[in-house]
Image (cartoon, grey):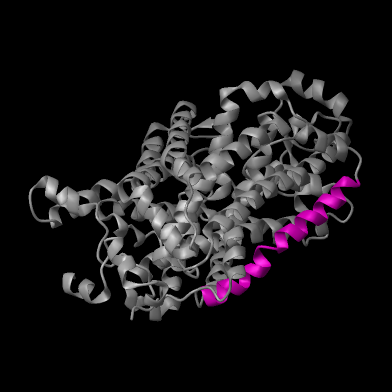
Amino acid sequence: MTKNARGNWKNWYEFLFSSIGCVVGLGNIWRFPYVCFKNGGGAFMIPYFIFLFILGLPVMFTELTYSQWSNLGPGRVWICCPLFRGIGFGMICLTGIVSIYYNVILAWALYYLVNSFYPTIPWSTCTNDYNTEHCYTRIQQTYLNISINTTVLSPIVDALNLTRKTATEEFWENKVLEITDGIGEPGGLRWQLVLCLLAAWGIAFLCLIKGIETSGKVVYVAATVPYVFLTILLIRGLLFDGASEGLLYFVKPRWDQLWKFSTWGDAAVQIFYSAGLGWGGVATLASYNNFHNNTKRDVIILLVLDGLTSFFAGCVIFVTLGFMAKQSGVAINDVVAQGPGIAFMVYPEALASLPLPQLWSVLFFLTLFTVGLDSQMVHIQTMTVAVFDNFPRTNKKKTIVTLIVCIAGFLLGLTCLTQGGIYVLQLMDWYVASVSIMILVFMEMFVLAWIYGLDRLGKDFEMMTGNSLGILWKIGIGLTTPFALLFVWIFSLVQHSPVTYGDQSYPKWSIGIGWMIALISLVPIPVVMVYTLTKEKGNFFERLRHSVKPLPSWRPANDEDINDNAELEKLNYVSQEETKTVV
């Protein structure tokens, strides 16, 4: 009798909260609000939810289903179609690269969190030793260490062509990063950030020290605490003058944007950032599911919650920005930013102007850290599960494997913690997150729908749940989603531009490195194809035909999950005894 050596979740809620932590990440807080605001506010929600259902639902359902059926993660699950095992290895590579700089962001959050306990918030004043004569605070209106009204100051500064920087900008650039002039000047390591990175990897390791036995408990806190903190921040923000203007600015539909091609393209691309499609994370978590779990239900719950969380986070951000704009006497669009800009400059600046700024700053950076932590936990699990699946003996050494992955991630992350490390992080994120992922997901859906087969996938689902897949799901998986993915890929190529950091462009040699990083997760696909075909016997067409058939080991992990022996034979699978003979 075959047994699942990797184990299963103790209950469905462990999987649910782990998956929530996976799909709800930093992109929901610092990317979605800006993209939504830029593309029509409330009107953007229409194309966003359309793509959430025609793109997000089929992709996530497919990833959950074939991993749950086999109890295998992306590093091994592609024995269902051996010729394309490189897709799974590509996902592992992609996740590995992302995990390196993702934890660097969590290290920044920890650094801000520690500084939030100071009697005077460091980024709230221009009197620190790292501040320059160009520093000013928008709300207190001090510039050149002189209190002055912004309406009087702006024309003077513009006329003199002076470069002003807010106190939060200078804290970020001069204190946190000690930023150099470009990627060609790496500078030295920022030892304070190195300690924070060590702490971030250490916390992640402790959460995963016994695999899902510990992570399944941690996620109850890590996945729910951010919602509590965000709710507190929203309630507090709504009580301030200007909050309603900020909220209205965010949600008010601008219908003219709805007819722009870029709005629909941005909505489709945002699905990848907010739902975690193609990273292998949700597939890894699903591989620990009970065989008869209903993946249709799970997908709908996760994606609806993900979309609502993105919108909720946007409301939290914009009510506070509305207050800051009101106090500063500037338009809201003058204080809006995305990415690290909104998390580490704009929003902290707004919180520093509130009564009890330490309290609100601590809440915000704890939220940022916990939101990122559970996503990072899944990144690590995706890599370790690939090891466990391909080398089953390592299941008895989970702690050691997890420790090795964490140490490697910490050492590689040091490249992003030099004084020029922000340029390295931007380079990695620019090319990995926007180029490789689209190709991987398209190939994943095409292979599963048209080579592995919709009928076979439907029978797998029916074996697990007793329900048929349904014609609409088959149309979505086989037709609608591949075309939608092509649209997203073409849109991304059209919109793609060489990497920049702010207004600063990168040298050509670094752009070349960026493309090499992007290709790391794609190289396994052709390499594995060639390797697989050379291992097969016969002429080319015979090898090709054999290489797209599931291996004999492609079956449910536990024999008791099979209703009868004829069920496997009908699906062209074999028993464990036959598997041993073949291998």
Viewer-side residue, 235 vs 254: 254
Q: Position of residue 28 (x, y in %)?
A: 64, 47
The foreground one among 424 and 216 is 216
- Residue 33 in view of the camera: yes
Residue lying at the far top of the rendered structure: 159
Residue 428, how many percent across, how many down?
Answer: 46, 45
Total numbered circles: 0
Which residue corresponds to the image point at 52% horizontal and 62% vertical from the top-left? 378
Magenta-span inclusion, residue 232: yes
In the shown orientation, is residue 544 left or right of residue 167?
left
- Quarter of the image with the N terminus is bottom left
Magenta part of the protein: which range? 212-239
354 part of magenta stretch: no
Where's residue 348, x and y in %? 75, 48
Q: Residue at x 47, y 55 (%)?
A: 468
Q: Quadrant of the C terminus?
A: bottom left
Is most of the magenta stretch helix, strand or loop?
A: helix
Question: Residue visible at 23% across and 49% down?
Answer: 529
Whether 504 is drawn above or below 33: the answer is above
Residue 178 placement (x, y as % from top left): 60, 48
**Depth check: 105 or 258 in front?**
258
**Where 36 sits versus 520, above or below?**
above
Of 83 and 206, the residue lying toward us: 83
On screen, residue 182 versus residue 147, left or right, reads left
